[in-house]
Image (cartoon, rainbow, N blue to C red):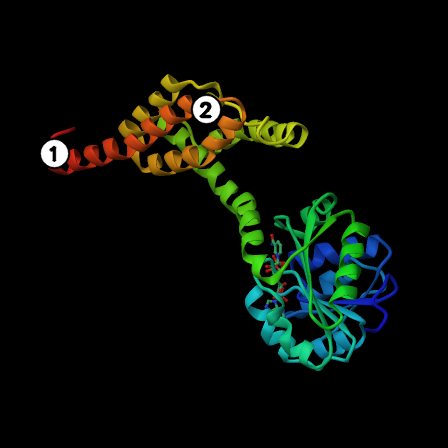
Amino acid sequence: MNKLDGSARIGFIGAGKVGGSLGVAMAQAGYSVVAVASRTAASAAAFAARIDGCQAYGGYQDALDACDMVFVTTSDDAIADVVASVRWRAGQGVAHCSGAASLDVLQAAARQGAVAGAFHPLQAFSSVENGIKSIPGITFGIEGGIEGGGEMREYLAKLARDIGGNAVFLKAEDKALYHLSGVMMGNLLTCLVGISAEIWEHIGYTRDDGVRALVPMMRAVAQNIETSGIPAAVAGPYPRGDLGTVRKHIDNLQARHPALLPLYRELALAGLHLAVEQGLTDEGAGEFRDILTKADTEADDMDRQDEEGTIV
Ligand SMILES: NC(=O)c1ccc[n+]([C@@H]2O[C@H](COP(=O)([O-])OP(=O)(O)OC[C@H]3O[C@@H](n4cnc5c(N)ncnc54)[C@H](OP(=O)(O)O)[C@@H]3O)[C@@H](O)[C@H]2O)c1
C-alpha cells in the first residue's frame, strides 16, 4: 500500500453532503485533501472552494491520479459504476461511505490492486454546513478488504479519531444490521416525530405546533439517555406501571386515531422489556401485554362494526 498514513493525498469523487462535510473535517484535522471530481462541475468547484489546496477536476481519472486515497461519496447506486469507470494503481486506497453497501461495490478497484475500505459516518447529514458541525463525537463503521485490510482499517480508524469521531470495525455480514440501527435512529425516529406531531392535528393544532411542543422534550430525552443511559432514561407510564393511563391511550386511539394504534401497540410491546429492567414487575408487564394485545382485537372488532354500520 502506498503512503496510507497522515501524509496520504486524499481525493473525493462525489461532492455532496457527506463528501463535502468529511473533506472539510479532514482538511481541518491536517490531512491533505487535494482533489475532487463530481458528476457536475459546480458541485466539485463548491467542494474545492471550501478547502485550501484542493483542486476540482473535470474527470474522475485526473482526480484519482492525483491521490493516494480516494473516497467515493456518490449516491450508493453510483459507487460501483464510478469505481469501474476508472483505472486504479496497485496500493492506492479507495473507500466508500455507504452504510448499506459492503466492499463488493469496490471490487473493480480491488481487482486492479487498490486497497478497499468502507468509512461510514453514523450520522444524518442534511447539508455540508450542518454536517461539518455534526461530526465530533459520531461513530464511523469501518471495513477493510482482504488485501491490505488491516492497514486500511488502522488508517480509517485513526482518521475517524483525528476528525473527532470514534471507530467501530464491522464484518460484511453485520453491515446491514448495523446500518438498520442507524436508520431506525436517524430516519425512523424523525418519522416518529412527524407522526407524533400529527396527533396535534386531532386536537385543534397544526403539525408544526406539535413539533414545537415536542422538540424540547426530544432534547431532554437525548440528554437523559446520554447521561443516565438505557433503561434509566425510559420514563412514562410503562415503567411506572400506570395501566389506567395506557388504557386511556388505547381507548382514545381506537375512538379518534385508529390508524396509529398498530404503531403505538408494537412500539410499546417491543420496549416493554426496558420497563421491566427499570423495575416494572413481571406481573405488571403481563397486564400491559394483555391490554395492548387485546387492543388489536378490539380495534378489529371496531373496524368490523364500522363496516357493518353498527357504530357511528
Ligand atoms: N446523507 C446522509 O445522512 C448519509 C449518512 C451516512 C452515509 N451516507 C452515504 O454517503 C454517500 C453520499 O451521500 P450524500 O448524502 O452525501 O449524497 P448527496 O448529497 O446526494 O451527494 C452525492 C453526490 O454524488 C454525486 N453523484 C451522484 N451520482 C454520481 C455519479 N454517477 N458520478 C459522480 N458523482 C455522482 C452527486 O454529484 P453532483 O452534485 O455533482 O450531481 C452528489 O453531489 C452515500 O454512499 C450515502 O449512503 C449518507
Split into 4 quadrants, where in the image is the C terminus?
top left
Residue 246, quarter of the rendered image? top left
Q: CA distance from mark 1 to mark 2?
A: 35 Å
Q: In the image, what residue type sits under mark 1?
A: Gly
Q: Which residue is mark 2?
A: 238
Q: Is residue 261 above or below residue 35?
A: above
- Secondary element at image label 2: helix
Left or right side of 216 for 41: right
Q: In the image, what residue type sits under mark 2?
A: Tyr
- For the residue carrying disc 1, how many other residues have a C-alpha within 10 Å: few (<14), some (14-19), or many (20+)? few
- Residue 16 at what x, y percent from top left? 65, 60
The residue at the point 15 percent across, 38 percent down is 307
Q: Is residue 289 above or below residue 187?
A: above
- For the residue carrying disc 2, how many other residues have a C-alpha within 10 Å: few (<14), some (14-19), or many (20+)? many
- Residue 23 at what x, y percent from top left? 75, 58
Q: Which residue is mark 1?
A: 309
